[in-house]
Image (cartoon, rainbow, N blue to C red):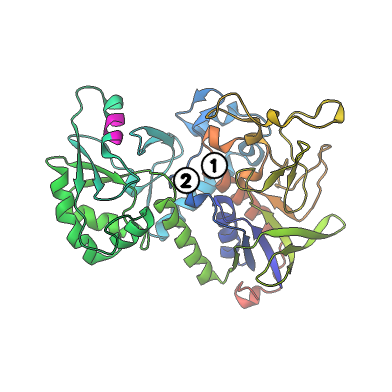
Amino acid sequence: MRAEALVVGAGPAGLATALRLAEGGHQVRLLARGNGFTHWGAGAIDVLGRAGEQRVERPLEALGQLAADHPYRVVGEGALRSGLDWFQRTAASFGLELVGDPERNRGQVTALGTLRPTCLLPAPAAGELRGNIAVVNFEGFRDFSPAFCAEGLRRRAGDGARITTGVAPMPAWDHDRYFTAVELARAIDEEDFRIRLAPGLARAAGDAGTVVVPAVLGMRSGHEAWADLERRTGLRLVEAAIPPPSVPGLRLFNAYRKRFAELGVRWQFGFPVLGVETSGDRVTAVRSEGASREITIACEQLVLATGGVAGNGIQAGRDGSLVEVVAGLEVSGLPPAPDGGRRDRTAFVGERFLGAHPIGAAGVRVDRELRPVDRSGNVVHANVRCVGGLLAGHDPTIEGSREGVALATATRAAESLAPAVSHATSGQGGASR
């Protein structure tokens, strides 16, 4: 097997990089050991929610406050803007309209009734909370509490807000006792189910004009199911982010996979990468598990989008060491072990469970072309690019920058590989062999 460009990882950075390269005519193969952050996140595009201890209202204006090795500073504001513009156009072509702009953060309603800072929201989550508001669940769905969400919204809005709760009865279907968000979303994808669901949803809303519901309004055909339910009920429906799996994230993931099929991108899913083969300063092939034997895939360029510790792109040893799992790249970001001995693994974590943890900012250091470098700043592999959460210098969870960093670095990687990847097979339309 071979590929011009081999992308490892199917999170926001890996998906975006693979698609941008495929759209540029490159032969692309995507490897992933499992589902990426699309299945876990809230479905929005976070650019920068916090810088240090300060909440950020204007992400682009705050970039100058970040450390010089932060991925945004490495690739530049232009790459971030270009990545966000590309993604908005791409999402719209998927039928997944995004609302907002990178100049100012906005709030996304959560199941806790809080507003998490983000930059671009899926249209079903972007409705304005005004007038009489109802928080409504679907009968039997256990992952969303209208009372809990409403109480949080009341605390934010003050005593004068009129926020009620309700439960929409479910039409007869195959899951009378228990069902997941994904099963409910699949049911709502069906027009007949929506026709039977809409009257009860409208009654549960009472006299409210805006209704907050769990983010389960379909996942097969973009935002079509949400728009249809708004028409049938005459209500402004606002999806609240709920615990994983993320239905809005699955909408995007499914759209990516459909587009990959159209462009001939080969997809190997469910088998971890075992290592690489090298010649000089270049990676020549990647080894991965297969159904019955080890598989070797020759490549001209390699993109690592495997994430940090949470994504299993970085592993910790019992001696306190950290290593990148595919190419064995050096990991930076933690203080060195005392006297060259073992690092105490308690240094990985902070004092507060929900606070910043040093290991969250650990990652691979890169040059401006996103090639991995050693401690002296020398390029380790000339044909390897590292993108997204794998990069050192940032903690995407704490600062709320995961999707923004993914898109900015995917943009820079695609730009840097444009002249580097051979076009020997371009006459075949970029289809994988």
Q: Nearer the viewer, residue 187 or 388?
A: 187
Name the quadrant of the N terminus. Answer: bottom right
Look at the picture and state if 124 lies above or below 134. below
Q: Quadrant of residue 351?
A: top right
Give left or right: position of 340 versus 119. Answer: right
Residue 370 image point, x, y percent: 70, 47
Residue at 63% in and 73% down: 432
Dot 1 lies on which element? helix
- Above or below — where is 92 with respect to 353? below
Residue drawn at the location 18% of the way across and 62% of the way down: 195
Q: Is residue 232 visible?
A: no
Dot 2 or dot 1: first in sequence order is 2
Read off the magenta span.
Answer: 148-153
Residue nearer the viewer, 194 or 303: 194
Q: Which residue is mark 2?
A: 41
Q: Residue tagged by mark 1?
A: 402
Q: Is residue 102 left or right of residue 134?
A: right
